[in-house]
Structures are given as C-alpha cells and as structure tokens.
Image (cartoon, helix red, strand yellow):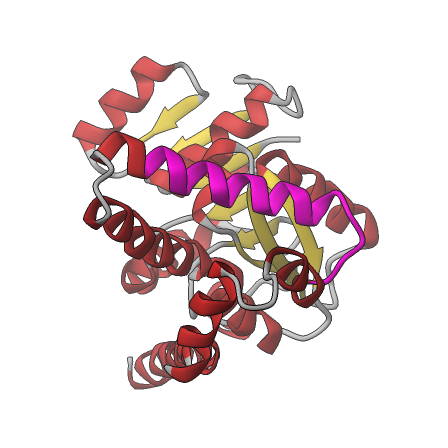
C-alpha cells in the first residue's frame, strides 16, 4: 500500500515516523508532498520516505492520501490535486473543521475518513477520534485505524458531529491539563520549591494519578474520596474549588471549545460556497 502524506508539518511527520517505527510501512511505500523547498530539504535528510515538491509526481501513485495541511490552505490544495485523484483512493483528513462532504465534493471522490488526533501522538500516547463516509469499506477502515493506532489509541464515532466534540475534549484537552499544571507549578514555587522541584512534583503527581486511575476500577469521584479525608488538606482545596465553581468553569470551557469548532466548520463551508 502506497501512502502519501500531504504536508510536512508536525502532525504529518508524527504520522510518518510512527508508521515507520511500527514497521506498518516502509520508506519505499511512504511519500511526502511538501511544497516548501526549505522544508523538503530538511525532510529528505530524515530518510522517512520519498519527498516530493510537486503533486503531479506522487498523488496518482497513492492508495491512501493523508491530508495534513492547515485548513486555510485547503482550497489551494483541492485546486492543485483535483485532476490527479481517483475514486478508488482513500483520503484521511486530520484538518480541524473541514467536513467530509466538503472534501468529497471538492475532489469528486467518495472514500473519506476524518480524524482528530492530539498532541501526545508525537510520543505515541495520542488519542484520536475518527469517522468515515459510507463508501469506505470495512477493510479500508481497519487498515487506517491500524495506522492511526501507531500514535496511541483511537475510537470510531458514528456521526461526524462527534469529531467536533472530540476536538473540544481530546484535541484541545492537553492544553487544559497544561493550564492546570502551570497553576500548580506556580503554587509550588510560591511555597518555596525551586522550578525543577516544582515541575517534578507536579508532573509526577499527574502521571501517577492517571496511571492509578487506569489501573483500578474506580471513578474520579471515588478516587477523590479516597484522597480527601474529613477536615484534611485535600478537602480544604476541594472546598475552595467548589466555592469558586472551578468544576463548572472547566465544563463551560470545554463547551466553548466545541462551539468554536462548530463555528470554524461552518466558516469553512461558507467560504467554499462563496468561492
């Protein structure tokens, strides 16, 4: 199977390296389309597949085409490759806000898979939600899921609207975690710990808490109760969070991210309609 990754940015390279590391493909079957000569030269030095600067040299050769460009660049890409694609090719899009219908109609193709990975995919700990058009076969879907799983874990969702929801939870989620970690690190520094000590205290606490959660059959509420003794230090912190409605604010923030994801999708459709 010939794989073409269009876009040599962070996520495109994350996929390329993960595919090769897992030996699910080889450099002979992996192609990368990167229009920037400077980036293309750097990619060539990495020996992660054949790097092309022109679409007419590689698009028609691919069985699977991964769209990993910025959403604002997609119309130019569509115009560039439309006459080079065929309806037997499978398209995997990791572009935020771009609907499968937009891709299908713009390229006059039918086999489209849309996925939302997240940043931890770079270290093989990613979380990806994905869905597909009706024309993608079960075999093709399993093939693509196997590729996605080289970067972490994945879930298939029946409805494309769930991709926007996944964007708000797992896509943006790492930033929420870093936001909370940053506050705890600053609190630790204010209590007299050095920067390195503060970072170790917080990062290891997060890692340990998540690993503990994954290795036992307790809910978050149950774990909270196990840590928080009556009248103790943890209860004091939780009471402060409760008073300041931190829990509600986190939920409200996630919903704000969802609303923005929906808006971006509509904006893309509107711009396509006007063009």
Front one among 49 and 22? 22
Q: Give the image location of residue 44, x and y in percent.
A: 32, 18
Give the answer, above or below, for where 119 lies relative to 232: above
214 in magenta: yes
Front one among 142 and 225? 225
- Tell me the magenta residue range: 199-219
Give the answer, above or below, for where 251 lies relative to 210: below
Q: Is residue 8 visible?
A: no
- Seen at 39% across and 38% down, the residue is 201
192 in magenta: no
Q: Is residue 140 visible?
A: yes
The kind of secondary structure the magenta stretch mainly shows is helix
- Outermost front residue: 231
Q: Give the image location of residue 80, x and y in percent.
A: 34, 53
- Seen at 40% across and 14% down, the residue is 47
Q: Give the image location of residue 84, x and y in percent.
A: 47, 49
- Seen at 48% across and 77% down, the residue is 247
- Seen at 39% across and 81% down, the residue is 256
Q: Quadrant of residue 45?
A: top left
């Amino acid at each position: 199977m010939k794989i073409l990754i269009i876009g040599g940015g962070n996520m495109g390279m994350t996929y390329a390296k993960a595919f090769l590391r897992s030996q699910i493909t080889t450099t002979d079957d992996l192609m990368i389309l990167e229009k920037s000569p400077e980036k293309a030269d750097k990619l060539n030095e990495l020996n992660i597949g054949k790097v092309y600067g022109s679409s007419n040299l590689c698009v028609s050769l691919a069985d699977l085409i991964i769209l990993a460009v910025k959403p604002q660049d997609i119309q130019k890409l569509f115009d560039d490759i439309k006459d080079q694609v065929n309806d037997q090719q499978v398209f995997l899009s990791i572009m935020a806000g771009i609907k499968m219908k937009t891709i299908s109609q713009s390229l006059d193709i039918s086999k489209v898979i849309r996925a939302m990975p997240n940043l931890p995919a770079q270290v093989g700990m990613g979380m990806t939600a994905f869905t597909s058009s009706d024309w993608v076969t079960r075999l093709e879907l399993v093939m693509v899921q196997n590729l996605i799983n080289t970067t972490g874990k994945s879930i298939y969702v029946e409805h494309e609207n769930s991709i926007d929801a996944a964007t708000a939870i797992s896509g943006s989620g790492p930033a929420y975690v870093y936001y909370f970690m940053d506050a705890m690190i600053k609190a630790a520094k204010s209590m007299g710990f050095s920067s390195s000590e503060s970072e170790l205290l917080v990062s290891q606490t997060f890692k340990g808490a998540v690993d503990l959660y994954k290795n036992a059959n307790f809910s978050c509420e149950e774990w909270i109760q196990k840590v928080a003794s009556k009248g103790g230090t943890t209860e004091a912190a939780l009471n402060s969070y409760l008073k300041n409605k931190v829990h509600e604010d986190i939920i409200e923030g996630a919903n704000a991210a969802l609303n923005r994801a929906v808006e971006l999708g509509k904006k893309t459709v509107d711009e396509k309609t006007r063009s």
